[in-house]
């Protein structure tokens, strides 16, 4: 999600990214229709626009591991008292896992049913990335074959977390970070408090640095779109439309069908009344693309309009703004599966489920970060054999989809708070 940090420039980042998208798109299409395979086009994409896009990706990769570690540790450590989790906390966790699992199934089914990334010649797609810059291979080294069966389950727990981070084993490293966060909850003393403050300081630094890197995003968007459309032409636009439609279909199904049924089954409340009550929070989420910026509005809606107990509302919504991100998980998962289809990488159902599981955990590490899904998506792409630079294909439409998925995230937080409160009152 986009950070709530104020953009003091005359033109907000969202508009600049859209301008870069439009400029690169139009410029690439013009070049594709007029110059085609001219030598100068290859020179520009190889030595100018391609390297700049690779620089943007390298800067993101430089920061992603400390970002995920600090965000996960601090997110878990916010649960100050394990006794509090016995009732409200465990129910929150239970509902979150149920809704997240449903989102996983919905995303996998839709991507496999609609096949938004199918129909592209894989050789042509890989040639396009090669034209954009050979630096993509240096971002994420080739990984050995992933283990299967019991070995795959055991590999989730790292025997060496430093090596897991160095090898880009994102899932194993997240398990280590989660363990550290739980340890901070269990051990409360002066020394662990100092350690927690240090991790929070690291998170502040990384967020600030990523904020500086994201200022390059409009130029990176223009470079990515110029490279893609100059080589792919109009066919790329058709495939991108299919991707956007698939993401929106997944988000709408989760919002309208899953959340409505969950609220009715758990509390007996009228889902239409629930959505009418949370409209201010949904509008704020769509406008700001930030769960953190929407949190005050969500708390007000929960206490004043939904009439939820104050303790439940504050606990669930504060934790949910970080940990419950169905929309982000669905977007990241659909994006990875779409790009795998786009580049002809055949993933088994087990591999797809693993990708979605990583995306659920990865959503925790993207809170409050402008375009924060991109580095997580790029890492997962490397895990499944898709070039990380492929994220450039979806970068231009990320802002609009960010607004939509943040709306689902905030709605999900309020839905879970309502469900927990309904049970707590029994």
Image (cartoon, rainbow, N blue to C red):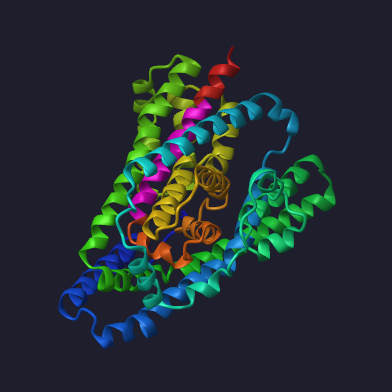
Left/right placement of residue 71 relative to residue 268 reads right
- Up-down relation of residue 46 to residue 338 (above or below): below
User: Which residue is at a point 48% across and 77% down the rendered structure image?
Assistant: 135
Residue 276, image x, y percentages: 34, 26
Residue 167 seen by the camera: yes
The spot of residue 256 in percent (x, y) is 35, 29
Q: Is 283 drawn above or below residue 162 in the view shown? A: above
Q: Nearer the viewer, residue 425 or 325?
A: 325
**Depicted 208 relative to depicted 148: above or below:** below
Q: Is residue 410 magenta?
A: yes
Residue 272 % position (x, y): 34, 22
Residue 24 appears in the figure: no
Circle count: 0
Q: Is residue 38 left or right of residue 138?
A: left
Q: Quadrant of the C terminus?
A: top right
- The residue segment tinted magenta is 399-417
Main SS type for the magenta part? helix
Q: Nearer the viewer, residue 239 or 63?
A: 239
Q: Point out residue 299 in the picture as x, y percentages from the top left corner.
A: 50, 34
Relative to the observer, which residue lies in front, 146 or 390?
146
Residue projecting furthest to the left? 34
Residue appearing at x 42%, y 48% in the figure: 334
Q: Residue at point 46% right, 72% down?
A: 56
Can you tell which quarter of the image residue 150 is in? top right
Decide if residue 114 is on the left or right side of residue 389.
left
Question: Along the horizontal axis of the image, is 382 left or right of 222?
Answer: right
Q: Is residue 204 magenta?
A: no
């Amino acid at each position: 999600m986009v950070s709530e940090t104020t953009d003091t420039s005359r033109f907000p980042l969202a508009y600049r990214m859209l301008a870069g998208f439009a400029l690169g798109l139009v410029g690439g299409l013009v070049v594709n229709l007029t110059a085609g395979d001219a030598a100068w086009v290859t020179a520009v994409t190889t030595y100018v626009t391609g390297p700049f896009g690779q620089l943007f990706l390298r800067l993101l990769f430089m920061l992603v591991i400390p970002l995920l570690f600090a965000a996960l540790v601090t997110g878990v450590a916010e649960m100050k008292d394990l006794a509090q989790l016995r009732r409200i906390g465990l129910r929150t966790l239970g509902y979150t896992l149920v809704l997240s699992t449903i989102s996983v199934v919905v995303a996998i089914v839709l991507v496999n049913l609609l096949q938004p990334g199918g129909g592209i010649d894989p050789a042509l797609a890989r040639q396009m990335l090669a034209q954009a810059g050979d630096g993509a291979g240096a971002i994420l080294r080739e990984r050995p074959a992933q283990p299967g069966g019991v070995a795959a389950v055991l590999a989730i727990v790292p025997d060496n977390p430093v090596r897991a981070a160095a090898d880009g084993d994102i899932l194993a490293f997240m398990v280590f970070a989660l363990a550290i966060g739980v340890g901070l909850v269990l051990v409360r003393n002066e020394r662990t408090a100092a350690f927690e403050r240090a991790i929070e300081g690291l998170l502040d630094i990384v967020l600030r640095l990523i904020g500086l890197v994201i200022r390059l995003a409009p130029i990176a968007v223009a470079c990515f779109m110029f490279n893609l459309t100059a080589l792919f032409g109009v066919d790329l636009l058709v495939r991108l439309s299919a991707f956007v439609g698939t993401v929106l279909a997944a988000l709408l199904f989760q919002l309208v069908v899953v959340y409505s049924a969950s609220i009715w089954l758990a509390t007996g409340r009228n889902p239409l009344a629930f959505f009418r009550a949370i409209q201010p929070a949904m509008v704020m989420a769509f406008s700001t693309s930030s769960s953190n910026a929407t949190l005050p509005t969500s708390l007000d809606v929960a206490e004043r309009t939904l009439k939820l107990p104050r303790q439940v509302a504050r606990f669930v919504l504060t934790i949910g703004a970080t940990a419950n991100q169905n929309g982000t998980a669905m977007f990241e998962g659909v994006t990875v599966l779409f790009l795998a289809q786009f580049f002809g990488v055949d993933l088994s159902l087990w591999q797809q489920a693993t990708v979605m599981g990583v995306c659920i955990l990865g959503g925790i590490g993207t809170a409050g970060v402008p375009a924060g899904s991109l580095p997580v998506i790029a890492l997962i792409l490397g895990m499944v054999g898709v070039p990380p630079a492929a994220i450039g294909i979806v970068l231009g439409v990320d802002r609009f989809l960010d607004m939509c998925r943040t709306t689902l995230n905030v709605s999900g937080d309020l839905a879970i708070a309502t469900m927990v409160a309904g049970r707590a009152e029994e």
